[in-house]
Amino acid sequence: MPEAMSHAVTRSVTTTGAGLLTSLDPLLREWLPRQRWFAGKGRPVTGFSPVAATELLPVADGKLGLYHLLVRAHQPSANLAGAPPHPGDCYQLLIGVREALPPRLAHALIGHAHEGPLAGRTVYEALYDPRPAEVILEALRTRARIGGLRFERREEIRPDLVPRVVTAEQSNSSVVYGDTFILKLLRRVVPGVNPDLELPLALAREGCSRVPAPAAWMTAELAEESYVLGVLQPFVQGASDGWELALRELAKGEDFSAEARALGRATAEVHTALARALPTVTLGHTQLESMVAGMIERLEEAAQLVPALGPYVPGLHSAFEALADLAAEGHTWTAQRIHGDLHLGQCLRSPSGEWWLIDFEGEPAKPLAERRMAQPVARDVAGMLRSFDYAAHSAGGPPAPEWAKACRAAYCTGYAEVNGTDPRTDPVLLRACETDKAVYEVVYEARHRPDWLPVPLSAVRRLAGPAPV
């Protein structure tokens, strides 16, 4: 183990989080809300409290220091009637400390500390610096124990892999190591079993080749709580992001239905493997009542947050009520573990033409317990159908509804070829799930990308109509 890493193992500073925040608080209040992965957009940060702080590289004169932090950001609750006080989201930060930043790291600047233990030093986002990224990989490679941090691996990792940060917009952060591995570092973390590690491990045990198997992962063990912090998986060199691929083909006027059909088959293979690996349940009247109640509650909250949704609320209610009516008549559905946030951006096509599914974290806005619940597979199908619709409105030209329609049909056909059941044969359930997804999208776009709000609103207009889709 390198000397710096050995020092870090023996010099955890998990008790000095409050002291570090004396230096970092004024800097983080400005920097954190600007990050793509910050969940509390639109609400001021009123303060921070430490969850854990661990020194990974000691701060020495003129040299790099590195801290791993878990901090809770305190904000007012969203402006909803009767909303309880928000406890604050917990964020994972890798903080680099230098006397001054070299020009190559200027874009990673967080600020200059003027008080506390870091006074007089420059603070920055350490993932953009190769040395801190190497420290994380070395900890995974050696199964290190550093304070409350735990690093595990399933396979051997070479020590000489050169890191580079993925700069594309993401809800978390990723580092590629030598075109061999990619580390997904979770930013907003909660205690408990995270499906982003749980489900790929279960699929690996089933031999499912459609999901990259975790090579290593990092967790924090704090008191009686465990946090999943990051997952290292194989990097699919030369792979095409499903979203970018769809937009390129659409811009060229190319048919995408063959790819959509293959993607439907891949989705069904993953669902089949998950049903083998983990328990399934039957949803009867009581369970469906609860599911529908959740859909209605999300709709009503969304209408308060996004007034443009208001005119469509009665029609959207009908999609959920139709599902409740079927349940009251005695219909049942099978539920199982699913991806939970499936769309084209969560899919990779390898150079050989195979589709892979990635990012099993689920919808980050939902509580972890809800993300780990068994759900009808129609939820994943609905997410992908919505994604084709997004692509049809986002390629730079006029909307292409016929392109989306062809992709949606091909995807369902491919799914049926593996699963044996076409999702379109259950239109009431599919409409309810797609409506619920569109409502989620409306809130997401209103908070994060207001210019995109017309895309889910166009789906809302369609789904609010009287006929199932």
Image: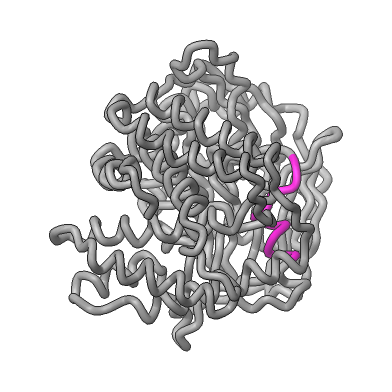
| Residue 337 picture quarter | bottom right
The single residue placed furthest to the top in the displayed view is 82
Look at 48% across and 51% down and name the residue there. Answer: 428
Quadrant for the C terminus, please: bottom left
Q: Nearer the viewer, residue 10 or 285?
A: 285
Task: Describe residue 186's horizontal placement relative to residue 44 as left or right.
Answer: right
- All told, the count of numbered labels is 0
Residue furthest to the left in view is 398
Colour setting: one colour
Residue range corresponding to the magenta coloring: 192-202
Q: Quadrant of residue 181?
A: bottom right
**Please, which residue is most extreme toward the front here?**
329
Q: Is residue 358 left or right of residue 453?
A: right
x 45%, y 46%: residue: 437
Q: Is residue 136 left or right of residue 124?
A: right
The residue nearer to you, when weighing 274 against 73, is: 274
Residue 22 visible within the image: no
In the image, residue 106 lies at what x, y percent? 37, 46
The residue at 40%/60% (across/down) is: 385
Seen in the picture, residue 346 relative to 466 is either above or below; the reply is: below
Q: Is residue 297 above or below residue 364?
A: above
Quarter of the picture containing the N terminus is: bottom right
Q: Position of residue 175 (x, y in %)?
A: 53, 61
Magenta stretch: dominant secondary structure: helix
- Residue 371: x, y in percent? 64, 45
Residue 333 versus residue 304 in the image, above or below: below
Residue 25 vs residue 319, the one in the foreground = 319
Please tell me which residue is depicted at 55% across the width and 64% down the height of the picture.
Answer: 358
Q: Position of residue 297 (x, y in %)?
A: 52, 28
